[in-house]
Image: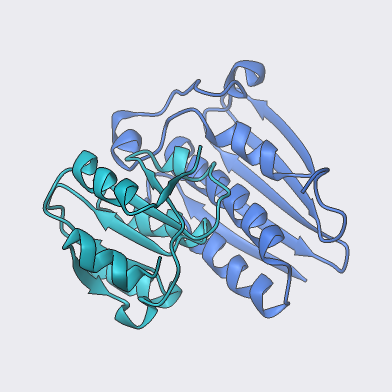
Chain colours: A blue, B cyan
Amino acid sequence: MHFEFKVQGGDFVRAGNASSQIKKILKQLNVDSTIIKRVVVALYEGEVNIAAHAFNGLISVDIDTEKIIIALDDNGPGIPDIGLAMQPGFSTASPIVREMGFGAGMGLPNIKDNSDDFKISSEVGLGTYLEITVYLKGSKEGE
Amino acid sequence: MKLKELVGCIGGSVVCCEECLDNEIEYAFASDLMSDVLTVKTEKLLLITGLANIQAVRTAEMSDLQAIVFVRNKRVSEDMIRLAKENCIVLIEYPGTMFKVAGILYNLGIKAVY
C-alpha cells in the first residue's frame, strides 16, 4: 500500500494530519500497538519538522507485510551540519515553533530512536530527505 | 487509578470524553514541551501541561496518552475537543499550577515516568 501527503511549511494546525491518518490505517491492519506508536511518533516528529523548518514537503508511506517505509522529502533551507542536528538538545527552531511546544532539539534523535533503519541527507538551500523504516516483526532489539 | 477517581481528587473540570473516564492511569508526565512528551514510551500515562493548543492533543494522540490536565486556567478550544473525541483522550481544565496538581497526583500514588 502506498500513501502520499503534502505538508505546508508553517501550518501547525494541519501538522499531524498525515500521522493521524497513518495511525488509523495501521490500526485497521491490526498492527501491534507498540509498532504503531513507534511509527506515528517518528512520522509526527518528521511532519512537525517540515512545518517548522521547510517551505513545503511530501511524505510517502509504503506498507507491506514486513515493513513500513516512510520518506519525508522537503523543500527548505537544508541542514548544514547533520551531525550537530542529530545531537539531542540542538535546535534552530524559531520562537513561534517553540511556542507550539517544539524546538527542544529532540526531534531527529527521537525519529532515529523509533526507527529500525534511519537515513538522512540534506543539501543547504534545497532541502532535507529522511527515510524511516520500521519492521513489523522483529522490532528493535530489546523491545 | 481510574481517571474518574483521579478527577474527583484534583477537582478539575472534565471538558470532553466523559465516556473514557474508566481508563486507568498509572503514570504522569508534566511538561510544556511536546518534544519531550514524544520521547516517553510509558503506557497508562496522563500529561500535565500549560500548553493549550491543538499540538498538545496531537501529541497525546501519537503517544497514546489517556488524558491531559491543562493547568494555570488554560482553556481548551473547540478544535482540541474535536480531535480528543476522535481518540478518546479526556481533556481536563485545572485552575491551579502544574506544581500543585503534580503534588496531589504524587500523593495519590501516581508514578513518575523516570
**Vertical side of A17 occupied by B33: above or below:** above
Count of marks, rendered view: 0
The one of B58 and B74 positioned closer to us in this rendering:
B74
Q: Is residue B90 left or right of residue A129?
A: left
Image quadrant where residue B7 sits: bottom left
Instruction: Say if residue A127 shows up in the picture.
Output: no
User: Residue B89: percent from the left, percent from the top?
Assistant: 39, 69
Above/below status of B105 relative to B61: above
Q: Position of residue A92 (x, y in %)?
A: 44, 23
| Picture quadrant of residue B21 | bottom left
Left or right relative to A77: residue B83? left
Residue B67 relative to residue A78: left or right: left
Q: Is residue B107 visible?
A: yes
- The quarter of the image holding the N terminus of chain B is bottom left
Q: Position of residue B6 (x, y in %)?
A: 30, 64
Which residue occupies 42% across, 32% down?
A103
Q: Is residue B88 above or below residue B37?
A: below
Q: Residue at x 50, y 53 (%)?
A: A7
Q: Residue at x 76, y 36 (%)?
A: A119
Query: Whole-percent x and y of residue A10?
Result: 38, 45
Rendered residue at 70%/49% (across/down): A71
Residue A87 relative to residue B53: left or right: right
Residue A142 figure quarter:
top right
Residue closest to the eye, A6 or B83: B83
